[in-house]
Amino acid sequence: MTFLALDILKSGVAFSMVCAVLGLLFAFFLIKAVIRLSAGNDRMRQIAGAIEEGAKAYLKRQVVTISAIAAVIFVLLFIFRDKFTAIGFVIGAFCSLAAGYIGMRIAVLANTRTAQAASQSRSAAMRVAFNGGAVTGLLVVGLALLSVGIFYTLAKHWLGHDMAVKSLVGLALGASLISVFARLGGGIYTKAADVGADLVGKIESNLEEDDPRNPATIADNVGDNVGDCAGMAADVFETYAVSLIGAILVGALTLGSYPAAVIYPFVLGGISVLGAVIGILFVNISGGRPGTVLMGAVGASGLVSAILFWPATHLLFPAAVTIGGIARSAGDLYLASLVGLLMTGVVVLITNYYTSTRYAPVRKIAKASETGHATNIIAGLAIGQHATALPVGFIGIAIFLSYHFAGLYGIAIAVMSMLSMAGIIISLDAFGPITDNAGGIAVMSNLPKEIRGITDELDAVGNTMKAVTKGYAIASAGLAALVLFGSYVEELKAHYGANHRTYTFDFSLNDPKVIIGLFIGGLLPFVFTAFSMDAVGKAAGAVVR
């Protein structure tokens, strides 16, 4: 057992990189499998080509804008920080952009093939759409894990462990830059195109959804891809990379005497790539209702990860581990990792309950629509606000339990465990725009009603999956922010301790500056939401004109 522990301790980062490469290879296998399928008749190909052209035009413009800003940040980091942090910034930005770009390109190729597969069966169409989405999921976790692993290994070789860990912050910053532009820009484009298409088609011209006579329909379909595929991919890539780096930082600062504390997050990420592959295979061999099959894939992926986390934890850590002056066990660390997996399942189930057509909340909103627009809006807002209670409550429980098991490092491990499920969760998210586009192509191509019935059913499931991913992304990002805040505090303590000075971190509500900070922090989401909504309104108006 000791020999095995030494081996995995030495090769844990390499193990994670091998798993990441396997995930990327499986993604390229799925790409070939999707492209090999029939893209349908000439009309379907023409519509899909227009969607692809629009998506490429948007991304080209986005890359030009991001590149200009990234160049300035790179120079500043190179001058005022160090060259390795600057290089890490470029690597993080490039990998995040690549994951979203490649994933979106495959999504626009899979949409028409999904519509064509619907002529065979519902299961065939679901598998094509899911495999197209799984490419994005595997690219996100594969590139994030591989980029952090390679950069850490090279930086450690040249700079040593301590400086390598600090240089990882640059990689996280690069991923964050792409996330802001891709998520916010893509979201504004998506909603502006959606609102504009509905105003022109449904209100002014009395046309149905995705009517080919509506010139804004293609823009609407493009928006689904750039917002829900490329945008969400960049968002979760950033959270994944930040969580991994945050766990490494916390491990290095709080468990400096245990090298395994830095390796453990890598190993968890590598194992979960294998779990994501199992989840994808589960969808391809299962039959039944699409929503049930997709939820089963999440369960299968989480189960594989939970089983493999146990031996990995006990091989890396000794029986007794001292964390923050308190004796812990390897079993405590394993339980902290389970908290993250369970939190993923809880968020998925709660979001699915509030957004699926099978359950009471959506049916209640539909019932309220019978008496007009006003009651529909009131019911929707009420249920939407009610839906925030359970996730927040469970997030609080997850924080308490993971901290109880292993202190701040336990929270970091729980977050990393939760984010390690990103491969299968992003696959569900990208499934949404593919099925939405497939439905649009079916309508615009005048395909038979039977095919449109299948694409409409898959579209409804896809909308639920997109909601599931949004809940997951928000919950994981909130926990990741807590880890980063904790690592910042630990870094301050280490800095003052190195200079033989005592430092007491005081976040007391008796301090008026703390209250002011809380008010400003609570205000910022509303301010940025207002800016975003204003941008959507202006862009939608331009689409209508």
Image (tube, rainbow, N blue to C red):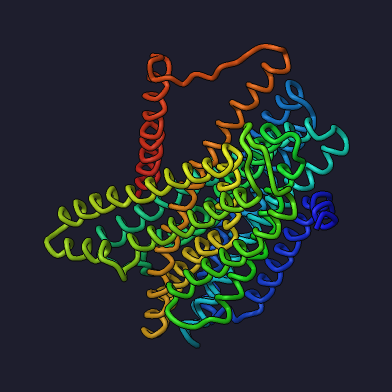
Is 197 displayed left or right of 40 in the figure? left
Image quadrant holding the N terminus, namely: bottom right
Rendering coords of residue 353 (x, y %)? 34, 63
Q: Nearer the viewer, residue 125 or 302?
A: 302
48 vs 262: above or below? below
Q: Residue at x 70, y 72 (%)?
A: 29
Residue closest to the far bottom:
120
Q: Quadrant of residue 36?
A: bottom right
Asked if residue 338 can be seen in this view, the reply is yes
Query: In the rendered picture of this protein, how many numbered marks are placed on residues?
Result: 0
360 vs 486: above or below? below
Is 329 displayed left or right of 6 in the figure? left
Q: Residue at x 36, y 38 (%)?
A: 534
Q: Nearer the viewer, residue 243 or 372?
A: 243
Q: Quadrant of residue 309?
A: bottom right
Q: Residue at x 51, y 64 (%)?
A: 428
Rendering coords of residue 174 (x, y %)? 66, 38
Residue closest to the far left:
371
Asked if residue 60 can be seen in this view, the reply is no
Q: Nearer the viewer, residue 193 or 473?
A: 473
Rendering coords of residue 439 (x, y %)? 42, 72
Rendering coords of residue 297 (x, y %)? 53, 70
Is 8 displayed left or right of 217 in the figure? right
499 vs 373: above or below? above
159 vs 416: above or below? above
Q: Residue at x 78, y 43 (%)?
A: 151
